[in-house]
Image: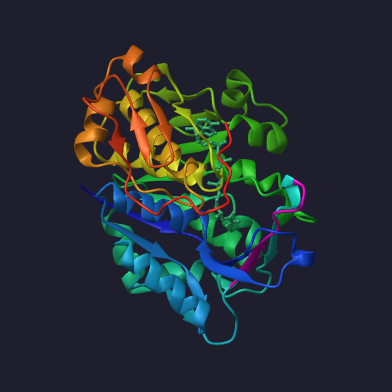
Amino acid sequence: MRSALCLGETMAVLSPDPPVGLAAADRFSCGIGGAESNVAMGLAAFGVPVSWISRLGEDGFGRKILAALAQHGVDVAQVQIDRERPTGLYFKDPAAEPEHSVRYYRQGSAAAAMAPDLLADPAVAALLAGAGLVHLSGITPALSPSCRALCEQLLRLPRDGRVFSFDLNWRPGLWHGQDASLLRGLADSADVLLLGADEAEQAFGTGSEAELRTLLPGPETLVLKKAADSAVSLHRDPATGRESRTEVPALSVALLEPVGAGDSFAAGYLSGLLAGLDETSRLRRGHLAAACTLTVAGDRGALPEEAVIEALLGSSEAQWRATSVAPGRIESPALPAPAVLPGRPIPAGSSVLR
Ligand SMILES: Nc1ncnc2c1ncn2[C@@H]1O[C@H](COP(=O)(O)OP(=O)(O)O)[C@@H](O)[C@H]1O
Ligand SMILES: O=C(O)C(=O)C[C@H](O)[C@H](O)COP(=O)(O)O
């Protein structure tokens, strides 16, 4: 299988522990968070050889991020270390309204200093030349003008058999005071564009398939996620120009925490693309990986064993629709018995929402 390369910022994440509002918090647990590195770890879990490219501060948070990604099987050899700027941070605020539930401290971070000269680094150029997939997201161009220039330059590269994927990851807080209309041009120059109907509505004023396809005619494949309902792939055959539509319902999930589901979906879908699977299987892999993440209290849930993935991907539509995922457990008529999901137990005091 050809390798993948994911580029973007990863930060240290500080979460009040216990989960109270920031004003009341005395203690924090520290994890790591970054959309593109979540995708990189997700791809590695599906067996894809993957590198993550970024820039970190010469600090403990940077070292923690490198160690965590390496532990998940992601190649971090070409991550740059910035001696002047720090690793970015964000805080979770469990008491805040959803649009303020995350507080970024990433302005002037090491990653925000990424620039097109990164591509002149011979080791990075070699990774890029060998990659079958290059994954970016709408977060990076919002970080700084130099990061935006880097994304523009990457998306202008000749394809040479590579696929450039782009997850919209609309973060209005990061675009404040900047021209967010640039995002549409970037998204439109990818080959595979992943976006949620809700975020498309906010960023582009519509979540409708037909209107989005008209607004974004560039990508060969547009993957529109409709949260708990379904995901739709609109794919244009490069040889004939014919457009086909594939829709796969989402799994029934006992949701614990939503963060990271979009990144896991991207990893599932893109791993299927690299493996040469059809659109239905790619979308199913996306839903399955997202469901595993939705049932844990972190950015990424562990996948079931390979035989379970295969059985679910090969199941009939009725069996797929009757499949449900709860913390630690998958039940499906396509499985001889409920499958146990590996991973951390549910933290005490967490409530399982439905
Ligand atoms: N309530 C839910 N039930 C089942 N699956 C869901 C639910 N919410 C999200 N998903 C899954 O997660 C994927 C990503 O959802 P999305 O809302 O786009 O996430 P994000 O906002 O994290 O990007 C969906 O395509 C679907 O597979
Ligand atoms: O870099 C950022 O700004 C982030 O938000 C990092 C987040 O951990 C993930 O991007 C989760 O994002 P979803 O998968 O959409 O829930």
Residue 223, image x and y in percent? 48, 31
- Total label count? 0
In this rendered view, identify the residue nearer to me: 244 or 101: 101
In this rendered view, identify the residue nearer to me: 53 or 44: 44
Q: What stretch is highlighted in magenta?
A: 88-97
Indicate whether residue 181 is drawn in magenta. no
Quadrant for the C terminus, please.
top right
Q: Residue at x 58, y 21 (%)?
A: 209
Residue 274, image x and y in percent? 28, 41
Residue 57, image x and y in percent? 53, 80
Q: Residue at x 43, y 67 (%)?
A: 119
Q: Specify whether 206 is left or right of 164.
A: right
Residue 57 visible at all: no
- The image shows residue 77, relative to residue 138, as above or below, that is below
- The image shows residue 4, relative to residue 80, as above or below, that is above
Q: Specify whether 55 is left or right of 45.
A: right
Magenta segment main secondary structure? loop
In this rendered view, identify the residue nearer to me: 39 or 255: 255
